[in-house]
Image (cartoon, rainbow, N blue to C red):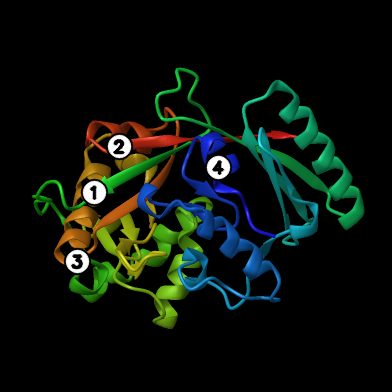
Amino acid sequence: MRFRWDWLRPVVLAPYVPTIGPVHPSVLTEDLFTDTLTAASTDRWFLRYDKDIRWSDSKDETVLVESIVHRSSETLIPTLSRRGVGMIKVHLYGIEPSSVLAATELAQKLSAEHGASKSRVVRFLGPESPGGRGTRIQLKDFRTALCLPPDGPVRSIDEWPAGVRGTFADFAEQMASDGFVFLYEQMQAGTVGPVLTAVVDGRVAGAIGPMEIRPDAIGTPQLMPQYFGVLPEHRGAGLGRLLWRAAMHWGQVNGAAYQLLQTEAGGPSDRLCRSEGLTSLGFIYWQAA
């Protein structure tokens, strides 16, 4: 099947494509949605611009093509993830009140058919929505202003003395819930780009990385998402802002055109990005089905 863009485009409130995630508005096209259907027809196949290709040799989530609902007032795109207990997500592009019920019923039906223990309806809001909640999609455009290097104790982990580098393992353990144990494993394997770190009293207190640039769907260089965190005892001292500005400086100097970020609406990272002048592109939130 192919999507009718005259049906789909009016109800895409935020630039988010199932299994791909947030995309730059300039690449939000019918073809991008259709690419996900092509990927679903080939087991364990990644789209060449899929950000998850950095971490795995197989794609966990796939579109259930035969169960898509596509009509003028709404489009429902279900996906299946087999990770853990399994999850069905129905991405709802539609503004009619009846669309929520239709998406919920589809999610419940597919969950039973595929033996998934969880099911969700994924919904979207536009950037100016007064009820913005869930996750905000934010855009940092490196072509609009100069990103100056930060003035503080931030540099790549490889540039610190051995004694400082050795404290990253403890930092990663303390920040395990933010994914840093996984990142540390990748760093040890030498499979990721630079990781920028903030050091206090000879120990890693915060980090952001890996720093990597990959082409998007139309070949524009995009700074990829990073793991980002500061130890609780060092929060509130400006280290997070120093790390973030260092990352943006790295991205601009190394030729990235932009970065897309996802931040919890109202959370610390969200407030940081808003104060740094990023552009809000909309919101993603979900409800149990």
Question: Mark 2 sits on what residue?
Answer: 279
Categorize mark 3 by other alpha carbons within 10 Å: few (<14), some (14-19), many (20+): some
184 lies above or below 119: below
Question: Mark 4 sits on what residue?
Answer: 6
Q: Is residue 179 left or right of residue 250?
A: right
144 lies above or below 131: below
Residue beneath the point at 40% across and 24% down? 128
Question: Mark 3 sits on what residue?
Answer: 255
Marks 3 and 1: CB-CB under 8 Å? no
Q: Hey, what amino acid is under mark 4?
A: Asp
Tell me where residue 19 appears, x and y as whole percent: 59, 57
Tell me where residue 257 appears, x and y as whole percent: 24, 58
257 lies above or below 130: below
Q: Secondary structure at mark 4?
A: helix
Residue 141, numbered label: 1
Q: Which of these two is toward me, 267 or 69? A: 69
Q: Hey, what amino acid is under mark 3?
A: Gly
Residue depth check, mark 4 versus mark 3: number of the one nearer the observer: 4
Q: Which of these two is toward me, 185 or 11? A: 11
The answer to which quarter of the image holds residue 196 is bottom left
Q: Secondary structure at mark 1?
A: strand
